[in-house]
Image: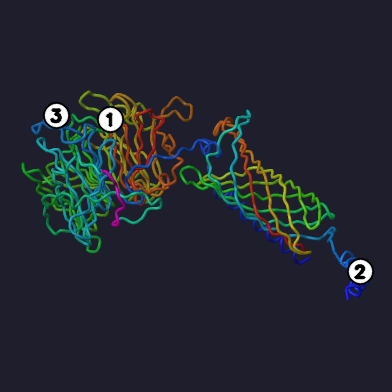
Amino acid sequence: MYMRRYFQTVWHTVFAALSCILFFSCTDVDHGLFWNIEHEEKIPDNSLPNDIGVYGMIKIPSLYTGSSQAQERWHPDGRYYLAGGALFFRESGSDWKRISAPGSGGIVNDVAWIDTGSSIEIYVSVMYGNSGRLFRLNEQVNPNYTIPNPSYDPLLPAGPSNQPRITDLTSTYTAYGSEIPYPNGGQIQRLISIDTDTTSAPGYGKPDEFFMSTGTPTNNSYQFFHCSWTGTKIDPHETGLSGEIITGGTYDSVNSVYWFVSKSHVFKVHPSALSSMPALPPSNEWMQHIVWEISSSSISGSDPDIFRFPNQRLSRFSDIFYDAGNSSSGSVPLVLSGIASPNYSTYNSNPNLYIACGDGLFMTTTQPSGTPQTWDRLSGGYHTSIAKMIYGSLQGESRLIAGREDSGLVEFERRDNLGTGVKEPYGHYPYGKYSDFSSLYNASVTRLLADGPIVIAGTTRSGAWNGNYSSGITSPKWSQE
Amino acid sequence: MLIILYALAFLSLPLCLFAQEDEEEDEYIPTYVLGDQMLMINGGLFVPLFFQTLAGDLHSTRLSVGGVGSLQWSTHLNNNMTLGGEGGGMFAFTPNDNNLFMLPVTIRYSYILRKYPFDFPLSIAGGVNFVRLNSVFRLLPILKPGISGYWNYNEAWAFGVNVVYWWTPDIYMGPTPPHSDSRIGNFLEFTLSARYHF
């Protein structure tokens, strides 16, 4: 009798627990559960370690035909560089190669490049405890170097699949060239390179301006440097924009203003202010506004209503992206163009400005002089990065891709979702086999790199992922770098 | 001397026969009546067989061989029939090492064929199947016909093997997911079992 009652209680408890799991865990999917298993394919996994954190990525195109250097230094498809503890690089069709930070105890935490018009300059930031150092990458890195037998690298921890590691090339040749000194020597938090050329093809730009955000959280001594090119080297000088880490930057090529974001603020900066910035307000006044416009002679703050949505101040700004379309041909922005009402009617003809922050992804258009109009919230959740993938020709389709914390990627397109004839921004999980890869859709995305129809997403703990839209804008092929 | 030994052997023969009759009379074959209960614990291999579409096409599951375990409780209706419940779980891996978990909770009926010290339960179970793949969760129906073989160690304990077929349909009416995504999962379980009567 007692045993019967005991087991009845056990079964009731188990059933109740399982029911709770059911109601708290159900999620909708586009395909059936068994169907998804049946169609799952083994993802291609390239040679980049799958457990590193990625904090900087660049793509150097092969640009030298016809330039003053008139030689093709890289593979015709260019070269990728990635900062993830060490510096990694690869060319199309090749495995990743690894270069440790110079000295001991260094962590490579960002990489950036600029095109000076006569050369390509690549810069790498390295963190040593509470200090940082900036290096110019030696051009004598041999692009034809191959590793015949990749071997296990004892410097890297064993991965879950115990895959072969990349042989470190640090001792093979001198990768790091001259060190670029800067005041205070604090940790380098971000390297930001920006393309200000109005004729650049979207997604294939050549950055020509270089910025650096430094500072150490322990003493809050943050500084923002503009690293101008002197003709032979870069020269970091303080802009005067201090107090917070600058987490992202972009350039409004139509109205010739910079946009930067820090953790708590959005800055619209006129180029003249970079060399002559007025004194910033005291800290108590500084925090009263979210958006600041800075010229060489004035500084003013404002607060768009939506930046205090919903009844709280937006914060944790992490990236900003300006999409002008291809202004040289007069075409409208490729992303989300053609959308009508309520606010989207203005998006037909005006460039779009996007901001990623802890409270979502926001967009607006910029009128002449760069004044933003009404802001709209495209997506909720902590967004960390923004990139634009371009599919096909410049006049073809494109996609805005945004990275998020703890929930991978979201892709935006135009869609008449409600059957009203009005196309509105529609955010969804990327197409293709994206939903097969829990290491991607559960990842915290740190950086996005768009290279035409290819998007590379760097994550905090699961390396980098490659989404290739070449074969179809609704059928990207996902693989792990 | 030899004659005396043969005589002793001949005279002791009835004693031996009497002793054998005692052993035959002492052998006890347990029988069970309404209310007698048993508890079984099972564990072993889980083999994904195929997914079947509603049109009858068969497709590979692409799943790895996995593991399965369960706990069963039954009560005897008579010496040959039992009715009870079962809860268990399995795991298997997809090509990208995603975990598929299925937790069926079923009611099981068995008919036991006996040839002491062995018995062979033929069973059918039906119930609900909690299925989870990464963040996707579904509640599916399930049928589990099976056959087992046990060796009765004593009146209380028995040890054996089970072979159980899992049939669990994953049906959609559309539009999302589409009706054509409907599949019927077919799996096989091979487990070792320990049974306790009480």
Residue type at mark 2 is Leu
Q: Which of A67 and A12 is in front in this view?
A: A67
Secondary structure under badge 3?
loop
Query: What x and y, as percent, mark residue A98?
Result: 25, 48
* Label 3 sits on residue: A65
Query: What x and y, as percent, mark residue B13?
Result: 91, 69
In the rendered view, does A231 fall on the left or right side of B117?
left
- Position of the N terminus of chain A, as image quadrant, is bottom right
In the rendered view, does B124 fall on the left or right side of A205?
right
Q: In which quarter of the image is residue A440?
A: top left
Residue type at mark 3 is Thr
Q: Are tags 1 and 3 found on a single chain?
A: yes
Secondary structure under badge 2?
helix
Task: Please report the residue visible at 42 percent of the width from the left and 44 percent of the height from the top.
Answer: A441
The number of numbered discs placed on residues in the rendered structure image is 3
Residue B46 is at least partly visible in this image: yes
Range of the magenta residues? A148-155
Residue A151 is inside the magenta segment: yes
CA separation, marks 1 and 3? Answer: 34 Å
CA separation, marks 1 and 2? Answer: 115 Å
Circle number at residue B13: 2
Residue A344 is inside the magenta segment: no
Within 10 Å of disc 3 (Cα), the crowding (few <14, some 14-19, many 20+) is few
> Which numbered mark, 1 or 2, is in the foreground of this view?
2
Circle number at residue A226: none
Check the residue under mark 1 and report the chain it is in: A
Residue type at mark 1 is Asn
